[in-house]
Image (tube, rainbow, N blue to C red):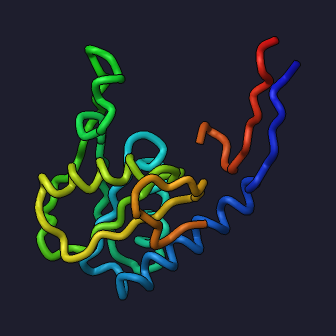
Amino acid sequence: MPNATTTLLDAKAFDRTLRRMADEITELNDGSDNLIIVGIQRRGVQLAARLGALISASEHAEVPRGSLDITLYRDDLQTVGPRPVVGPTDLPWELEGKCVVIVDDVLYTGRTVRAALDELADFGRPARIALAVLVDRGGRELPIQPDVQELDGKDGVFVVRMKADV
């Protein structure tokens, strides 16, 4: 039996949502002058690139973009295994005094964001850090909330219910 899939956002709704998020990020930061967009590996990086491009186009200024791999900052690293796969962290700018927006696809317990905040602190002290997520699942274990919210080669948001093995 195939998995049941429910579409929450199709490609058009996905695009509209990203545009709204980009506008909210720009408003939250009074423009793009001191703005840096940082995506959490993996899908957060893709979303950050798209949001950054939308903001750059609307503000007529290049918005720096980067990535965080939070693997070594996880609070459950010992359960990952003896050789965790670590992706690139790319933050080639000075963070001091900047407005950093951390971007991820889904916010659930808040533990990934906590790890991202820990890693970001190793690179400097921004004036402000905001969080932008596409989907907020609830279920928070830490007091973390998105400031802005509303990929697998296909734009959309889908809920896939796996059929239980019998």
**Whether residue 76 is situated above or below residue 29 in the rendered picture:** above
Q: Is residue 100 left or right of residue 123?
A: right
Q: Is residue 17 left or right of residue 70?
A: right
Which residue is at the far right?
A: 1
Quarter of the rendering containing residue 89: top left
Q: Residue at x 22, y 52 (%)?
A: 118
**Whether residue 166 is situated above or below residue 63 in the rendered picture:** above
**Whether residue 89 is situated above or below residue 29 in the rendered picture:** above
Q: Residue at x 16, y 65 (%)?
A: 95
Quarter of the rendering containing residue 149: bottom right
- Residue 49 seen in this snapshot: no
Q: Residue at x 25, y 75 (%)?
A: 128
31 or 86, nearer to the observer: 86
Quarter of the rendering containing residue 138: bottom right
**Whether residue 30 is situated above or below residue 80 in the rendered picture:** below
Q: Quadrant of the N terminus?
A: top right
Q: Quadrant of the C terminus?
A: top right
Q: Is residue 20 left or right of residue 31?
A: right
Q: Is residue 86 left or right of residue 51?
A: left
Which residue is at the far bottom?
A: 30
Q: Position of residue 3 (x, y in %)?
A: 81, 27
131 or 99, nearer to the observer: 131
- Residue 66 seen in this snapshot: yes
Which residue is at the far top?
A: 166
87 or 119, nearer to the observer: 119
Q: Position of residue 58 (x, y in %)?
A: 47, 78
Q: Position of residue 156 (x, y in %)?
A: 69, 50
Q: Residue at x 81, y 38 (%)?
A: 5
